[in-house]
Image (cartoon, rainbow, N blue to C red):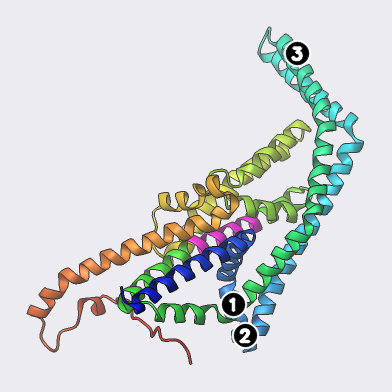
Amino acid sequence: MNSRSTFRWISVATIFFVAVAALYVTKAFITTILWGIFVAYLLTPLYSYLLRITGKKQVSSLLAIAMVFLVFVTIVIGAINAMATEVSNLSESQYNIRKMADNFSGTVSGFAEDYIPGASGYIEEASHEFEDFVSSVLPKLLPLVAGAISGFAVNMPIYLAQFGVAVLLVYYLLIDGKNAINKVIYLLPEQESISQFISELKPIYHSLFNVYFTTCVLTGAIATVGFLLLGISYPFLWGAVVAVFALLPLVGTNTIIVPMTLYYLVIQDYTRGAMVLIFGIIFLNLIPENILRPRLAMKGAAIHPVITLLAFAAPIFVVGMIGIVIGPALYGFLLAAYRTKVRHMGQTEESPASDAGCGDGDVDDADAEGGPTHTSLAPRQ
């Protein structure tokens, strides 16, 4: 091994260990960085729109972040106020909760006596157990809430640091993210294959991320309007919560609708409970899944629903909520690589026939079918 090869191997080993060390010292912010990249990706359309209006990258990036931050702060303040009010009401109304449980158990017992003879004894025993459960759980629940709040306050400096890193990362990615990606791609070999891969990846990510999250936001907006019309307390807060839970494919909006329906049934507001249930089934489940999402995805890449379900649901059970970002990114990457390989194989099979049978005036099949045109990947000067 000559000195040049030795130096090359030493350089590769040094870069590898430095990269591992950098990853280790940054591990506390890995999740923050991933969320920052994801938020920057979602904010790119808003940033592009603001850039056409202002003409300045820095101003457009700041405005886009400020809009999202304003919405976030509004939701958080509303959630804190609602939680404080509800906790205060719970701590001061244990008697009312017990009375509510008595009324509910009395209603169930009356129904059982009228339509199920001989079951009143079992119903009465179950009602007493339910009352004891309510009375015992509430005093234990309040200290847990207080402990969670105190733990959040202790970790507040870490959360603020992570939030600051995320904001700065989003700011610079919006300003120069596309140029940085073009420079990285320019350094890679096989420019034509990379260009095909990028042309496949963009619509896939658009369908997996933009369409999916746009549908969730629209679902939250529909929920807010419906809760306002139904006279439910904190409609904007619950609408935002519905939008968040709509991100979870396995449970979705039913995580909010089912407990809310049970709550109104317990307090004997049967009409509102039934209306909440019907509203949730039709407007928060059927319409978003069968009308909104298919129409939004019509212009994007055709992705099988099973792939979408696995991309968003499976990683959550492994890496937590960050799986909402990691899962679609990995599945989309693999799907784009597969489609690029299939396209490349198709072009390889068609090229001999094209060379043998096409004259100078013939048009290439890919161009005739409206195949993708590849833009320059050279870095901007």
Residue 354, position as x, y percentages in the image: 13, 77
The residues colored magenta run: 208-222
Per the model, the C-alpha gap separating discs 1 and 3 is: 62 Å
* Residue 129 in view here: yes
**3 and 2 marks in contact (CB < 8 Å):** no
Which of 202/379 is in front? Answer: 379
Q: Do the residues labelled 1 and 2 touch (CB within 8 Å)?
A: yes
Disc 3 is placed on an element classified as: helix
Number of residues whose C-alpha sits closer than 10 Å to that of mark 3, classed few (under 14), some (14–19) or many (20 or more)? few
Please provide percent x and percent y for residue 283. Answer: 59, 50
Q: Name the residue under label 2.
A: 57
Amino acid type of the residue that numbered disc 1 sits on in the rendered structure: Leu
Marks 3/2: CA distance? 68 Å
Element carrying mark 1: helix
Asked if residue 116 is positioned above or below residue 282 in the image, the reply reads: above
Residue 225 in percent (x, y) is at 69, 56
In this rendering, position of residue 328 left or right of residue 29: left
Between discs 1 and 3, the one toward the N terminus = 3
Task: Classify residue 191 as left or right of residue 307.
Answer: left
The mark found on residue 125 in the picture is 3
**Residue at coordinates 11% horizontally, 74% vertically from top-left?**
352
- Residue beneath disc 1: 174
Give 225 or 129, whichever is nearer the viewer.
129
Asked if residue 184 lies in the magenta stretch, the reply is: no
Residue 263 image-quadrant placement: top right
